[in-house]
Amino acid sequence: MNSLERVAGELANARRVIVSGHVMPDGDCIGSMLALGLALERAGKDVTFVSPGQIPLIYAFLPGVEHVKVNPALPQLNPEAATGLVVIVDTSVPERLGDFLGVVSQLRQSGWRTLLIDHHISALPYADYNYIDPGASAVGEIIFDLLKLLGQKLDRDIATCLYTTIATDTGGFRYETTTSATHRKVAELIEAGVDVRAVSLQIFEERPLKSIEALRAALNTLQISPCGRAAWFTMDKETADRLQIGDEHIDGLVNYARVIQGVEIALLFREVNEGKTKVSFRSKNFVDVSRLAGTFGGGGHPRAAGALVPGKLDAVRDAVINASMTALGS
């Protein structure tokens, strides 16, 4: 682990920077990547924005998103021009870089260094430099503090990206990770020009029709445990393919199970293919779902986590539900 001051120093000394997030990027991932990259550009750095996965349309409004290269091959990054620093944000394990992990490995062999900035309690320090703060509500909070150390002024574009990170990862400032320090930072972001209403409309109040079709399909699969403390949805591949539902249409569906009165653990099982199932975990009060997800090779936060589990859908679902019942003491 490194101090935030060391991280700031590495960024200040770097001439070329590649900023990357993870597969299936969310608001914290995309907003942190863009905010840091835009700030570094304003400081005169040569910055390349990379996303290992497609950017969901709900984040298309973010400043700078049009410059993001999605899952680029090594030659597109022109690594021979000069070595630099690969900054990886919000990516707790290297596998979440997807196919871009191979590119990062090649860059390291060419002399590039890597820097991880994350806030997941399950994060591994796998880069050359690592800053992990599980107490931060979002990576965006860390980027906020980092920009202060770098002497970077907050403009409207950077502030909008940072506001999006915090608003999304706190569930609209509802989760227990939301602190008084979080609100003080948000106040500065608003003072820097964030249009709170416009951002909130984009990230919370508008969804493509496919998302509603995905919700309808998921609700038809809703099951609740006999004790009433666990609820889950299932999305098999046949249904997703038939409805042409993608990752961005499924994001957040698990929360509809979480809001059911009496439910502590909510789950969403999505069949990726016949050999893998993606599981989304949520809890309400006391179950640490990052630990629960960790038993299946995943991770995340105490109240929100995920895992990509090898095995057929039915078998994975049975195993996860059994583990959830144990976590509930049922």
Image (tube, rainbow, N blue to C red):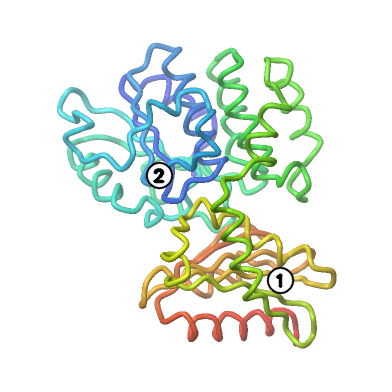
Residue located 57% across and 53% down the image: 211
Q: Closest to the observer: 59 or 210?
A: 210
**Is the residue 2 above or below the residue 308 in the image?**
above
Q: How many labels does the image show?
A: 2
Residue name at image x 72 percent, y 26 percent: 196
Q: In this view, does 12 lie above or below 177?
A: above
- Return the residue at label 2: 54
The amino acid marked with disc number 2 is Gln
- In the rendered view of the protein, which quadrant contains the C terminus? bottom right
Q: Which of 44 and 149 is in front in this view?
A: 44
Q: Residue at coordinates 53% horizontally, 36% vertically from top-left?
A: 59
Residue 215 place in picture, x, y as percent: 62, 61
At which x and y percent is residue 245? 47, 58
Q: Quadrant location of residue 281?
A: bottom right
Q: Would you say 233 lies left or right of 263 here?
A: left
First in sequence: mark 1 vs mark 2: 2
Query: Picture coordinates of residue 313 (x, y %)?
Result: 47, 80
Q: Which residue is outermost to the right? A: 261
Q: Nearer the viewer, residue 317 or 1?
A: 317
Query: Circle 1 — which element?
Result: strand
Looking at the rendered structure, the kind of residue marked 1 is Ile
Q: Which label number is shown at residue 265? A: 1
